[in-house]
Amino acid sequence: MARAFASRIISWQRRHGRHGLPWQSTRDPYRVWLSEIMLQQTQVATVLPYYLRFVTSFPDVLSLARAPIDTVLAHWSGLGYYRRAHHLHRTAQTLVARHGGRFPHDTATLATLPGIGRSTAAAIAVFAFGAREAILDGNVKRVLARHRGVDGWPGAPKVEARLWDIAYKLRPARDIEAYTQGLMDLGSIVCTRAQPRCDACPVAADCIALSTSRVSSLPSPRPKKTLPQRALRVLLIERRGEFLVERRPLLGVWGGLWSLPECTTGENAATAVRARFGAQIELRESLLPIVHRFTHFALTIHPQRLAVRRWPLRAETSGIRWLAPSDVDAIALPAPIGKLLRSLVA
């Protein structure tokens, strides 16, 4: 069964899988690693321009390790899940400091690096070093859960453990790269979450989910939870055509990015600015709220425009800067904040 399953996946990948992606033409572990991190929870079409821009500016581990984090975040801006960019930077610095700028070949050591979990470490080992490893990303979980009829949410420890066991048993003795790529491609192109194309699936003949009419119910969805709602007011403090932005703390939402100052929705915006900066502010119009959804909560952003009448020199610190409209795309801003500022200068 294992050999038959793997051989069908390999044959399908060679005929129908994705080929010609920029990270597929190399065994450079740096580029393989970069692509795997960018592809976490992000579609290939979205990743492509970011990947190409990133490798142009940071062609190797050393150049990434030496780059200021601001520059790295600016290249990542808009791709989301910014902790990945911080992990990339930290991993590059760790590789230079502890491994001579080279990637370890063994999966266990790779998995200890920031942002590289078990499945990502295995993917790097497969595509860069030809290691006979098993991966279990979201697409592969879906393929295996359906094909082997595994009930339960794949994020549950017992279910995930069972899927890992299946993944290891199904590994082929040869052509591990084509097999691994094939599994990922199959989950992305054919065995999709909605409207799967079972008629085009190379392993449909013995798919338990298909034979038992459970394709639409496997894998089981994440147990539903009410998405918490949060709200904040962002302050568009304008002076001579420039907007005040400040660097956010490294930990937390939008860690390390530049963003607009904030206050609670219950605070008076002008009073909050005077208390914090000692500035004289003229309150202007409130703009329409913006709803931005994160994985674990939904955030309603209430933008408030303010104009500076007097700005004290003591308020000029290293954690803030005045952003000209022409520089909105040059620094790392959260996606909704960047979109808001662009709308004001369009």
Image: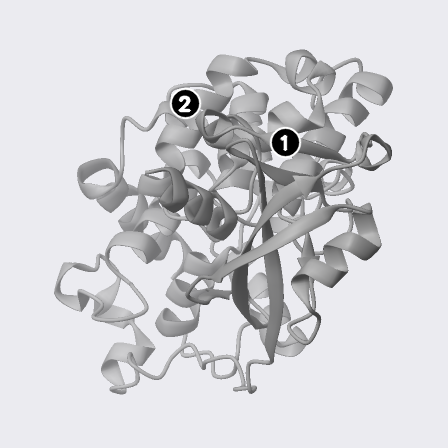
The answer to the question of whether label 2 and label 1 lie on touching residues, with beta carbons closer than 8 A, is no
- Quadrant location of the C terminus? top left
The residue located at (24%, 82%) in the rendering is 211
Viewer-proximal residue among 213 and 173: 213
Viewer-proximal residue among 84 and 318: 318
Viewer-proximal residue among 105 and 298: 298
Q: Quadrant of residue 46?
A: top left
Residue 232 placed where, x, y %? 62, 67
Type of amino acid at the residue the image marks with label 2: Leu
Say which label, 2 or 1, has the lower sequence index.
Answer: 2
- Quadrant location of the N terminus? bottom left
Q: Is residue 178 left or right of residue 226?
A: left
The residue located at (27%, 50%) in the rendering is 8
Q: Is residue 121 above or below residue 210?
A: above
State whether residue 224 appears in this view. yes
Q: Is residue 197 left or right of residue 163?
A: left
The residue located at (78%, 17%) in the rendering is 96
Residue 68 placed where, x, y %? 71, 21
Type of amino acid at the residue the image marks with label 1: Trp
> At numbered mark 2, what does the secondary structure look like: helix, strand or loop?
helix
Nearest to the eye among marks 2 and 1: give it. Answer: 1
Category of crowding for the residue at label 1, using alpha-carbon neighbours closer than 10 angstroms: few (below 14), some (14–19), many (at least 20): some
| Spatial CA span between label 2 and label 1 | 30 Å
Q: Quadrant of residue 196?
A: bottom left
Residue 187 placed where, x, y %? 34, 57
> At numbered mark 1, what does the secondary structure look like: helix, strand or loop?
strand
Q: Is residue 319 left or right of residue 73?
A: right
| Residue under label 2 | 52
Q: Is residue 281 above or below residue 221?
A: above
| Residue under label 1 | 322
Residue 242 placed where, x, y %? 55, 33
